[in-house]
Image (cartoon, rainbow, N blue to C red):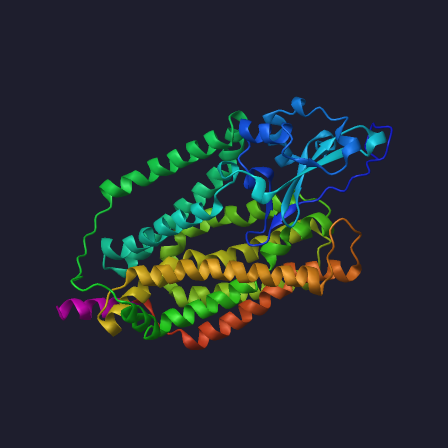
Amino acid sequence: MVEGAAHFDLLFYTLNIDLIKGERITLGDIVNINDDFRELLINGHFEPLIESKSEHINLESITIDSLLRSDYGSLEGERNNMISCYLKDVSLVISIPTIFSLGDHAKYEIKFNQIPESLRVKHHIWGMIYTISDVPIFALATVMTDQVEERTSLITYGRLAALLASLLAMGLFMPIVQATNWTVGAIIMMTLAFLFMVPIRFFAVERIKYDREEAISMKDIFTFIKSNKPLITYYISFLLMGMSNTVLISGAYFAKYIMGDENLIGVFGITGMLPLLFIIPFLPLLIRKFGKRNIFIFSAMVGIASNLLFFFVGYGNLVQVIVLNSIRTITSFMPMMMMGMFSADFVEYGYYKTGKRAEGISFSVQTFATKFSQAIGAVIGGFLLGDVFGFVANTELSDATIDGIFAMYSWIPATGIILGLIVFYFGYKLKESDVQKMIEEMQEGK
């Protein structure tokens, strides 16, 4: 029953979830919400799923603002009279409120291939552009200084800035979109990103010069990777941990179906990320004191313990859930914060072993491993959720399904961390002092 209303609410409200990112998919993630999209809807390009209902809907009354608000259509207290959307295998469905006697809503559907290219959000183009900029920005530290500790500081400050920028973007983007539109919002964010990156061109100095007379061949690439045991060991460990990280997939389901409040997704994210702002600045000091290898091992052990403890104590106490989730989020992000530092070491190790300097290869492997582990983790998470634990949307969940979602959110990620830790502990021996010694020996050999 809707509070203050005369009739029951007959609708199920669901979320569209990006299984790779573990985030909600909104209408604005699929199409550009602008005048052209509104025209597409009101001019008959969408097919009504029930003709009798559509006769009572005045599509002309739909505004861009109401379509933008559909991105928040699942928020408690706001959703009952709002437009919403959901995805089918090959189509997008828009649901528009109508009177109770007609079933509360009318649905309009359009096939994805019927949506003009100009209205589709180009995530793949963005992903490629991001990758193109991601590799050189990490590699830059290796030519700014040949001191391992200085590189650690440079990469640490870069990761801290990236975290701050992410939080800033999350806080600013949607208010900008609501005040303007998606296109203007994207332009403003791109402009801000450009302005923050421009100083690199003028103030980042490549002080270290290397002999690069010969181009890197495909054979050199495979030789560089094959002879680089630390690189292979680290990224096997990283992939094992990442592919089992079903927290990203199950987080939205855990919040909505087990904790009973989908808004907790944001709470879990913020309480996990904010402590990193205070920890990351001390990372160079911690690495100088303990070394990246020991910090990686310690983080993995605490991650295993926090995931298993979470499973055994359960989810009855919200504060307890937030604390344990925060601890394991920190421990899972610590290796990621050091990833660029490890890759910089692999550059020097590969140069020492092969005589070929291949920063692009080392940092490209880093980007590939990140994307690959997320993709495989999404496939595994989707398989577990639907095929193993029997999750079916818009139905009452069985005890087995609830237990399965909680397992994905607690002990299952620990299995991959355990396997990754075993590989890393026994296979990775490279220390910061070893890398610095290699650099000095190669400089003396010039």
- The extreme bottom residue here reads 426
Q: Give left or right: position of 158 versus 441.
A: right
Instruction: Name the one closer to the observer, 53 or 306.
Output: 53
The image shows residue 429 at horizontal and vertical percentages of: 37, 74
Q: Give left or right: position of 298 versus 232.
A: right
Instruction: Name the one closer to the observer, 69 or 412.
Output: 69
Where residue 425 sits, quadrant-wise, is: bottom left
Instruction: Name the one closer to the observer, 331 or 383.
Output: 383
What are the residue bounds of the magenta stretch? 433-446
Where residue 379 sits, quadrant-wise, is: bottom right
Quadrant in the picture for the C terminus? bottom left
Residue at (74% x, 38% y) in the render: 49
- The extreme left residue here reads 446
The image shows residue 47 at horizontal and vertical percentages of: 68, 36
- The extreme right residue here reads 6
Queried whether the magenta region covers residue 442, the answer comes back as yes
Residue at (60% x, 60% y) in the render: 246
Is residue 34 visible in the rendered structure shown here? no
The image shows residue 424 at horizontal and vertical percentages of: 45, 72
Where residue 64 sits, quadrant-wise, is: top right
